[in-house]
Amino acid sequence: MNRGTIAEIDLEAIAHNFRTAKKITRNKTVIAVVKADAYGHGACEVAARILKERVLCFAVAYTSEAVALREAGIKTPIIVLFDKYNIGDYFKYNLIPVIHDIKTARKFSKEAAKRKKPISVHLKIDTGMGRIGFTVPDMLKDIFAISGMDYMVVRGLMSHFSEADLSDRSYALIQLRIFNNVRKLLLDRGIRPSICHIANSAAIMTLPESYLDAVRPGLMLYGCSPLQKSAISYQPSAKDSRLKTPDSKLFPAMTVKAKILSLRRLKKGTSVSYGRTFITVRDSIVAVLSVGYADGYSRAFSNNADVLIRGKRAPVAGRVCMDTTMVDVTEIEGVSEGDDAVILGRQKSEYITATELSERTGTISYEILTSLGGKAKRIYTTH
Ligand SMILES: *Cc1c(COP(=O)(O)O)cnc(C)c1O
């Protein structure tokens, strides 16, 4: 269903960011995280493009996401990070489960035995994220038991950082130390998973000692740095029309546009939108845009964000509605109905980043990308 927004996805930017992850990690194996429809960029299209860069493996959250990739003809190994149901799909579509409890391991072993088809798994240990994974006191006992199960091949060992995006790396280093200790204890028992991985985008940028056998970038592939705020401030580059981080490492890949549906001249003192939270302080021109919170443009942007029209910033005026948003365009010369309004991305020399939008509403760029990209009609550009 097409609503009022279009997301232009720059697949070459994603390919560039993938190569950047390779460069930063000195050519480590990359498990490209394409969950949540590639953070709103479209998993099948993104995966197909990254494949040309010779990616080893993709990661998704749920089996349905992996099945969609298989149905799009993608044959690369796929790790499913969270789904412990739909066990049949793992065999049917040749997917790699992440196992984080012994009960599920038993189910997989049983199903594999029934089919006489060994299953390769990655085991997830909780080193301090407090979400999912084996923990003490049963961790080692469980892992020993699993590696002895019929038709079970423990191919990988993984964990996840809760806090690698800070300048203070101490908690991440504790998690890494725990992970390495577990690896050693397993090795003592002859269990040697061939691929150990823990590094997300933040760790790729801050923690080289965490690269191990493979890295698992998500956000950075889409051109955002998880090191928000002052750590990275985006600068446009004179040479390239795309956005770049100052160190030229990442290109944001998503531009989201709406259109001006109506232009209205309002007298000084006129209220705009629900709740009358915006009242014109002068005779004004207000544009009604084809984007609302149903398009993933958060209601928290009410009186609290800008859009770009004719290369200039126009502030949101009043509350964001379900399907529409009003912006003050009094100062924008030549503004016309039908003009593009860039919600996210660059227009001429101005730019609005996911980080900027996230900071305005106290969220993270991940949520901005998945919200806006997930709802827009996506079109793909390759240079
Ligand atoms: C989402 C996710 C990643 C990717 O994280 P980014 O911060 O986007 O790089 C890696 N590993 C796991 C387990 C995840 O859930």
Image (tube, helix red, strand yellow):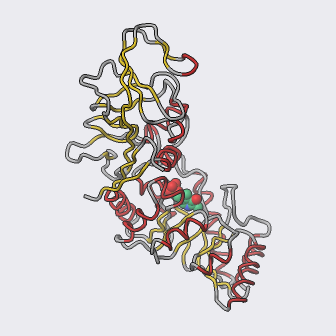
Q: Nearer the viewer, residue 42 or 1?
A: 1
| Image quadrant occupied by the C terminus | bottom left
Question: Which one is in front, 340 or 33?
Answer: 340
Relative to 160, residue 115 above or below: below
**Residue occupying the point 62% across, 77% down:** 90
- At x 74%, y 73%, the residue is 104
Q: How many labels does the image show?
A: 0
Closer to us: 359 or 142: 359
Q: In this view, does 382 lie to the left or right of 201?
A: left
Q: Is residue 16 above or below residue 240?
A: below
Residue found 39% across the figure and 61% down from its top: 21
In this view, which residue lies farthest toward the bottom?
116
In this rendering, is residue 299 above or below 111? above
Image x and y of residue 212, in percent: 51, 69
Q: Is residue 310 visible?
A: yes
Quarter-of-image position of residue 150: bottom right
Image quadrant, ligand 1: bottom right
- In which quarter of the view is residue 264 placed? top left
* Left or right for 373, reference 134: left
Instruction: Please say whether residue 203 is visible from this viewpoint.
Output: no
Residue 25 placement (x, y as % from top left): 41, 64
Q: Which residue corresponds to the image point at 43% horizontal and 35% vertical from the top-left?
A: 290
Percent x, y of residue 266 = 40, 13
Vertical order, 28 against 228 (above or below) = below
